[in-house]
Image (spheres, rainbow, N blue to C red):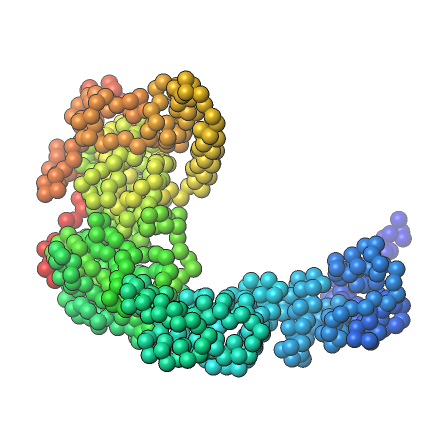
Amino acid sequence: MQGCSGLSGGMQSSTSNASGKNNNGGAQEQEFTDEIDLGDRFSADMARLCMNERYSDVEFVVEEQRLPAHRVVLAARSEYFRALLYGGMAETTQRQIPLEVPLDPFKVLLRYIYSGTLLLSTLDEDAVIDVLGMANQYGFQDLEMAISNYLRQYLALNNVCMILDAARLYNLEELTQVCLMFMDRNAADLLQHDSFKTLSKESLEEVLRRDCFFAPEVQIFLAVWKWSRYNPNVDIKSVVSFVRLPLMNLEHLLQVVRPSGILEPDKILDAIDERSTSKTLPYRAALWPEENVATAKFLSRCIQGECRTALLDGDVTTYDMEHGYTRHCITDSNDAGIVVELGTLCMINHIRMLLWDSDSRAYSYFVEVSGDQQHWERVVDYSDYHCRSWQYLYFAARPVRFIRLVGTQNTVNRVFHVVGLEAMHTAKVPRLIDHFVAPKANVATIEMSAIVTDGVSRTRNALINGDYVRYDWDSGYTCHQLGSGEIVVRLGQPYHVGSMRLLLWDCDDRTYSFYIETSTNRKDWQMVVDRRNDQARSWQNFHFTPRPVVFIRIVGTRNTANEIFHCVHLECPTQDKCYLKKIADMEREREKEKVKERDTEKKVVKPEEDDNTASTSVASIAAPGESPSTSSPSSSSQSVLKSNHWPPTTQSPKQEQTKEKASPAVPQLPTPLTPAVSPPLKRERNEPRKSPSASSNTSSISPSPSSNPSPSQSQSRSRSQSAEPEPEREPVPPLVELDTREEH
């Protein structure tokens, strides 16, 4: 025990002496540590063994020179050498192993194996490429990636062809793409450089087939012709087939291509015919990833429209009713428009533009692109949809020189106004379904140009401002009077969506009933959520058959506390990750059922068994809990997850009146106890909105339970007896109706 005490005391003394000053009052001593790191010394000792005959047990013979090595070191550093030296092959017992590799690069590799370091700046480009090849051959993936990253930083006209050949040979995809993009950016200069003729045939064809290898086609042809003379043993016909002859004018075809003699006359005649008759020529175009090319920097300009200079000036903040936008008059023949000419042909797959949005007006339009301003291709067509503010448009990448914007509707007047336009090629392309964006993020937000057009709230866009935490009895929600109102949200542009999430006001234990409809034109509505027979509260998730959506209409039919329907927050599509996982799982199950159904249909069935087979097929896709006899094909195609409110698509209440009795899959509208809980009739377009202040239940716009229902409603609704009446509050002011009579 005394020994332990003495040892402990000694350790304490050492620690204290190390952390404080020494006995002579000198500087603080170095702190002790429990980790010994002598890695640098170890690496230096191992490096001394490189090509050292001491302790060596194997020799590599390279270019008639003997290089001593150590089996255990090589096997520990490389799986290739482990298999070679200890895998039972002939080399396992050999003292000398001949290798057919360059001597100097192999010495560099051996030094890396023993030391773990390699100074690439001391090597010339040929040596670096040779070491890269050996790293690939012997399985040193970390070294291979490090050399690849090094070469990416030092690409130049005199080495890019050699590096591209090496990258393709060793299947280095990232390095290959970087080389190709460098060649795209410097195509004209590369074609004139001597290194271009050293390209392999496969690499040359890879370069020529790219739409973004942008240079005059006659220069490309001349460079290929020069390459063929430098590589006389290569079949030139397969290479020349990638030259786009129709892009050359008649003079070049007759005075340059024809005298070369490397093409048959019929090929030249075919090119002349295609150039004169084809509407879509195989253009090449410059590629500037993630960069807006519709700017003065790229010599782009607006060549058609009124107030042209405002469109591409980059100012998308200082605009009003008088200036800051470009416009054109809307005509029935759609012969007018705004045209932008890019500085040169560019690869484009994304256009972003800002429609004038200082009020709640909406526009309809379409977008066309062209390479020659003669043959136009429509890439976006929103002529039947309401759009506002920022527009995010995507389409398949293509060469574009001219962009034409044609407005087809303005809900206020007959003028189409565009504040700003951007055009670019982006790798961040969202999923597209029938040319509509199918978003993953919530697009029912102010940032994505959505707006609340109908409903009552203290702030106009409280429903879509993203705040679903700060709400109480007086603010933070949007509402409408039961039986005479509705809440309508208009998205910035049509989106292909199939889910939503809604937060109902839940500061007490009240419940709501409601339904949700969607539309693309605010005339034709489709019911996607039917909760008229349910008692819902707080968060609600919904899934329905995906479809294009512009307008979302939420109509409350019952509130167990008063005559007002209150919503706090809307998401489209839902951002609930757990619910999205359930949707994905359900889609996978649905795909499995479809596969099983297809497998069943492939089986040979006797004629007398057809009826039975058909009924079995219907039964196999019926919703859980439904009998095959009550499941129609339309209702069974949509599985209903009751715990998460997955309603089938139904018609609106107004449309139900014109149809026969609904099938069991469609809930029926209950008999209303009072007119206040019946589904509201759709208001005609020009019918004035009834102000909540004009109603006798104005004070009930607040969610306070101070407004008592009628006796008949009290018998049919379950209300919390513990809820004490709140003091009387002033009614929530209705949304301000903006004056949309501007004529600019």
Which quadrant is home to the C terminus? Answer: bottom left
Is residue 558 shown above or below 44?
A: above
Which sits in the foreground, 30 or 274?
274
Extreme residue toward the front, this view: 265
Q: How many marks?
A: 0
Residue for point 35% across, 47% down: 433
Is residue 107 shown above or below 57?
A: below
Percent of width and height locating residue 519:
24, 41
Is residue 582 shown above or below 635?
A: below
Residue for point 27% across, 51% down: 493
Which sits in the foreground, 639 or 459?
639
Question: Looking at the rendering, which quadrant does residue 131 occupy?
Answer: bottom right
Residue for point 21% across, 20% down: 671
Q: Is residue 141 left or right of residue 250?
A: right
Residue 730 visible to an observer of this rendering: no
Q: Is residue 306 left or right of residue 257?
A: left
Residue 664 visible to an observer of this rendering: yes
Percent of width and height locating residue 236:
51, 71
Residue for point 20% across, 25% down: 659
Percent of width and height locating residue 566:
26, 37
Percent of width and height locating residue 727:
23, 35
Is residue 713 shown above or below 76?
A: above
Q: Is residue 58 left or right of residue 173?
A: right
